[in-house]
Amino acid sequence: MSYAPFDWIDDEARHRAGAGLVRTLRPRTADTEPLDLASNDYLGLTRNPEVTAAAAAAARTWGAGSTGSRLVTGSTALHAELENELAAFCGFEAALVFSSGYAANLAALTALTGRDSLIVSDAGNHASIVDGCRLSRATTAVVPHADPEAVRKAFRTHGGRALAVTDSVFSVDGDAAPLARLAEVCREAGAALLVDDAHGLGVLGEGGRGAPAAAGLAGGEGVVATLTLSKSLGSQGGAVLGPARVIGHLVNTARTFIFDTGLAPAAVGAALGALRLLRREPGRAARAGAVATELYDRLTAAGLTAVRPDAAVVSVRAPSAESAVRWAADCRAAGLAVGCFRPPSVPDGISRLRLTARADLTREQIATAVGTVLATAPLPVS
C-alpha cells in the first residue's frame, strides 16, 4: 500500500480550479513593467531616487541584514530614528518598528489582550487582524461592517478588559471606518481602540499623517495604531504607535517582536527617507486622493459599478470570480496591472478589480488606465 500523505492537496487544487480561485506567482522584471494600478505605492515613492538612495546608504552603513532579533543585535540607531520620527509625524507618544505590518498587527492584538479579554472586530478587517484575534486567545466578537452601535452592544456582553479593532481604510472597497464614533463607544465602555492605518498613512489627515490624526484621535490614551511601511512609504515593514507604556509592554511581551529578526537596515532607511520626503511635500497625500476620485468618476460615468473611495483604493465590481480573473488578465495583456480580489479575500463573496491610485500618475496615464479597464470589461458598459 503506497504512502501518499499529500493526496488531499490535489483534491483541494481541483476544487480551487473549478471555482476559479487558483492563485499563481508572476515574477516581474525591472524594465518591462505595465502601468501599475495594482500595487500599494500610493505616493509613487518606491522608485523615488531619494528613497532608493536612502536605502542604499543604510545598507552600506549598517549591512545587508539586521543580524538578529532587535533585543539581541538587530536594533540599530536607525531603527530608533525612524520610530521617533514616525511617532512625531503621526501624533503619537512612541512607536515600535516590526518586520512587517502583519507582524505589527499580531503583536498588538496578542500583547494587549488575553484569555479574559474581549476583542470586537469589524467583519471587513484584514486577514492579519483576523489571525491576531485567533492567536490572542481572547473572546472575539465579529460585528457588522462599520457599525459602532454593534460594537457598543458587543461590549455590553463583557465586564473585563476589552478592545475594538478596525482597519482605518478597508482594503477591499476602500471605504473608511467611522473612527470618531468608534472611539466614543470605546471611551464609554472603558475599552481600547486599535486602528490598522495601513491604507490611511500618507493619504488621509493633514499632509498624510493618517486616519487617527484626521479623526482627532492621535495620541489618545486609549488609542493604538498599526501601520505598514510598504504602502505610502514605499519600503517594507510595519509599526505600532501609541502611549509609551503600551510600546514598552510590546517590547517585553510581543512574540513577533521578541523572536523575529529586526527589519533590514535598507528598509528602515528607505522608510525614513520617504517619511522625510512626505514631510517636505505634503501635497502628495491630497494628490493620491484626487487621482482615486477621478478614476471613480470616470469609471462610474461609463457605467461600471464602483465604490466611492475614501482614500486611494477604487473597487470595481465584477460579475463573478472567473470574470474578475479574466478581466485582470486582459488588463495586464493590454499593459495595465490591476488587483483582483475574490473569495476568500472578500468577505461578502463579491469579486472585484481593485485599482490603487498613485500620486505620481499623469492625466494621460489616468486616461489610459480608464480606457483599458473599460475596453476589457466582461459586460457591456452604457
Image (tube, helix red, strand yellow):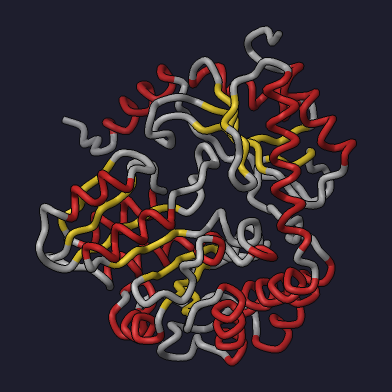
How many marks the image carries: the answer is 0
Q: Is residue 130 left or right of residue 36?
A: left
In this view, the residue in front, 73 or 381, is: 381
Residue at 41 percent across and 74 percent down: it is 220
- Residue farthest to the right, as pictured: 364
**Quadrant position of residue 158:** bottom left
Please determine whether, in this image, residue 198 is positioned above or below residue 219. above
Q: Pinpoint residue 75: horizontal percent, then vertical percent.
A: 51, 87
Residue 361 against residue 278 in the figure, above or below:
above
Q: Does the rendering let one see residue 47?
A: yes
Residue 127: % across, % down? 38, 48
- Name the residue located 30 percent from the left edge and 67 percent from the top edge: 192
**Where's the C terminus, which quadrant?**
top right
Looking at the picture, how far across and down is residue 81, in whole percent? Answer: 61, 87
| Residue 233 appearing in the image | no
Q: Position of residue 339 (x, y in %)?
A: 61, 36
Dividing the image into 4 quarters, which one contains the N terminus? top left
Quadrant position of residue 243: bottom left
Residue found at x 71% / y 58%:
285
